[in-house]
Structure formats: structure tokens, C-alpha cells
Image: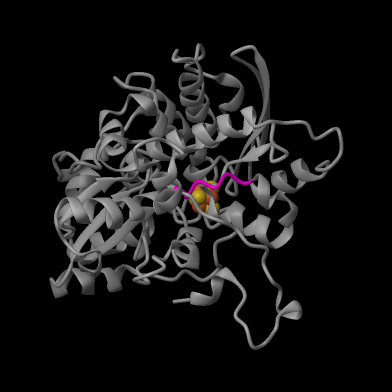
Amino acid sequence: GQCSVYCPSGAITEIDHSKKVETVLKSKKKLVIVGLAPSCRITLAEIFKLTPGSLTTGQCVHLLKLLGFHKVFDVQFTADLTIMEEGSELLHRLTDNATTLPMFTSCCPGWINLVEKQYPDLIPHLSSCKSPQQMFGSTIKNYYAEKINIEPENIFCVTVMPCTAKKKELLRPQFKDKKTGLKDVDLCLTVREIGRMVKRRGIEFAELVERAFDNPLGYSTGSASLFAASGGVMEAALRSAYWLKTGEEFPEMKFKPVRGLDGIKQATVDFDGKELKLAVVSGGKNIHKFLEPWGTKAFDYNFIEIMACPGGCIGGGGQPRSNLDIVPIRLKSVYSREKNLPSRSSHENPLIKRLYQDWLKKPYGQVAVKHLHTTYKRYIFPSEMDPNKNENNEKNKG
Ligand code: SF4
């Protein structure tokens, strides 16, 4: 097909927030912070007709600065944070011998929406971790604001995402501060919206020199970059969960069974003497097929990664429009650079270590659970609804 809006959860009509962001930038009333999602540094180049698969991280940072964002941070930093939390949660569920195994990943809002609407029995099995987008916003408003001595209401937090479902995710009531009503993330822009902003400004992307992310949310590991592709969260989580459990590095840094574009991938792995059964699924049809035996003995896993878009976020509904042949090229780009990075596992990220020292204390501890974890709720269909109550997460449409 000639369309990349195959994100099953994305609305058919596209809501464009780029002008809203431009208005906030022009008003100069707030500190406007932006975070760049993992896959976007690979796909943005396509909008400007550069070779598909080109990794343009430094140019993207420069571009976001030129567009007027005051701080340009990396959502890969909070992808590393997600892994520390999710890896710890997995260990907790494994040692607890909990009935809440298998654990499913929770970073894809397309998948979360599907569970809340069609598979509510799975809710206790979803990892309670917020997605990297929401951990990003929470870290900005609850930690960074205090660090730089600014009131969180004077910060406007934007993300650049591969995804239309992320726009709704940030509106969930769970992601609003209970006291102040402030959202973790104020607005999300897709790669295509960034493309429009650039065209309006007449910036020549190909001519931009590389710039570095701002800190303290500007450094990430190879694990975080893997989030762009289906199987990446699984691979990253295994590396760090293994390390958290044993103090040693996971022996298979290239864990082949979860790589590639197959819609359903399965593997078993020796996890410190215990056999872990894993599955990685992407794409709407594959998800339904995979979940068919749920509740029977045939459905036997410990940890499952699910992404709504085929191939994961590199195939997301907010990516540059292209035909599906481009997804393998983007995928190759994800893996080719990861193997050469100096730190490849989230637990090696020195700025993540600092964040725990300064703020969170320990993974899956009290502070972390308060700020970085969330809850889910069965969706109430209109036919079941009490007209006097607004019962769904989607009530704050805007
Ligand atoms: Fe969004 Fe990625 Fe999920 Fe697609 S796979 S809905 S792009 S988070």
C-alpha cells in the first residue's frame, strides 16, 4: 500500500498539533522542552528525501533547536529508564511466583487500548511501567523542574513520536498530576508534523551540522535505540533483568530469535538456571492470532512484548508516508549502529545511575512506582455507560 497509516489505533483523520506548538514557542511564556523518540532519528531523513535508513540524530537535535525548542532531550534516555523499571518488575513477578505471569510490555498505547477494550482479562498482566514518552514527561515535571528551580506549570513538554496513538496516550487521566492537574507531556508531534514545521520555516535539513542533546536527559545506550523495532524492548529488558539478577552481563548481546520482521517470534532462554519462555508480537492481526489460545495450557509464556504496528515503531502511523518495503531498511539501520555503541545495556547509562541516586533511589522502589508506573482500566462501551458519569480514560479529548 501507499500509506503508512497502518497503525491500528491511529485515527484515520490526522490531528495536527504543529501550529499549537509554534504558538507556545512564539509566546515565550514557558520553557519549551522537546524529547525525540528512538525511531524518529532514522525516519525523519525520508521526509527530506535523504537515503532511507539514514541515521540523523545530530541533525534532528539541531533542527529541533532551530525550530525554537529551549531544551532538546532524548526519549531514549527514558527508554533506558523504562528498562530499569520493567526489568525489575519482571524479576519481582518471577520471584513472587505471581499469578500475574506472563507479563506483557506496556510501552505501546495502541496495544494498551486494545487490552482495555477487547482483552480486559489481561490487565493484571500488563507491566505497570509508563511508556518512555510518559516517563519522559514525568521526569521533566517532577525531577528536572526542581533541579533547575522552575515551577512545573512553567514548562511545556513536547515529544516527537512515530505514532498517532501517543497523542491520546498523553491525555489519559492517569498521566495528570493529582494535585495540580498538570499533564506529564503537553503535546506530541509526529515525524510528519515536524516535517511540516520545517517546510514552513524553509530549513534545509540536509545542510544542518550535528548537534548534541542537552543533559541531564541526553545520553542513552544501545538498548534504548532498540526500542524503535519489534523485539527491541524484549532484548533490552533481558540484558538488564539478567544483570539485575546475577550481576553479570547477559551472554547473548545479539539475541537473534526476537529480531526480524516476523509478526510472531518465540524463544526460550536460560535465565540463571530458569527457563524463560518469551514471545514478541507485532501488528494487529498477529496480536489477535497470538492471543487466541489465551487461558489454555497451550499459552505458556513468562514475558511477552507486543507492539501494535507491523515491525514496531519503525512501521508507526506517524512515520513519513511510504510503502511497506521501507520497513526492512529502517530495521537494518536500527541494528547496524547498535552493535558499535560504547554502552549497550540500560544499566550502564551513567545518567540513569545519577537519576536513581538523586531522585528515584532504586528501581521499582517507592518513588519510582509513584512517578514512573501507572494503572489500566477496562474500557466502558457506550452501551454499558451510566450517562451521569464519565467512565473512560478518553474523557479528556482535546
Ligand atoms: Fe505507536 Fe509504536 Fe505502538 Fe505503533 S508500535 S502504536 S508507533 S507505540
In percent of width and height, residue 124 lies at 67, 49
Residue drawn where x is 21% and y is 62% of the image: 32
Work out which quarter of the rendered image holds the C terminus and state it.
Answer: bottom left
Q: Is 127 covered by the magenta stretch?
A: yes
Farthest front residue in view: 366
In percent of width and height, residue 387 lies at 67, 87
Q: Which residue is nearer to you in this view: 372 or 361?
A: 361
Q: How is the image coloured?
A: one colour
Residue drawn where x is 19% and y is 41% of the image: 215
Q: Which residue is nearer to you in this view: 136 or 91?
A: 91
Can residue 8 be seen in this snapshot? no
Q: Is residue 35 above or below residue 226?
A: below
In percent of width and height, residue 163 lies at 46, 55
- Magenta stretch in the rendered image: 126-131
In percent of width and height, residue 11 lies at 55, 67
Q: Image quarter for residue 351?
A: top left
Q: Is residue 194 above or below residue 341?
A: below
Query: In the picture provided, is 38 more to the left or to the right than 202?
Result: right
Residue drawn where x is 57% and y is 42% of the image: 105
Q: Is 80 covered by the magenta stretch?
A: no
Q: How many marks?
A: 0
Q: Is residue 268 above or below residue 53?
A: above
Can residue 33 be seen in this snapshot? yes
Q: Which residue is nearer to you in this view: 91 or 154?
A: 91
Residue drawn where x is 43% and y is 34% of the image: 84
Q: Magenta part mainly helix, strand or loop?
A: loop
Query: In the picture provided, is 74 more to the left or to the right than 313?
Result: left
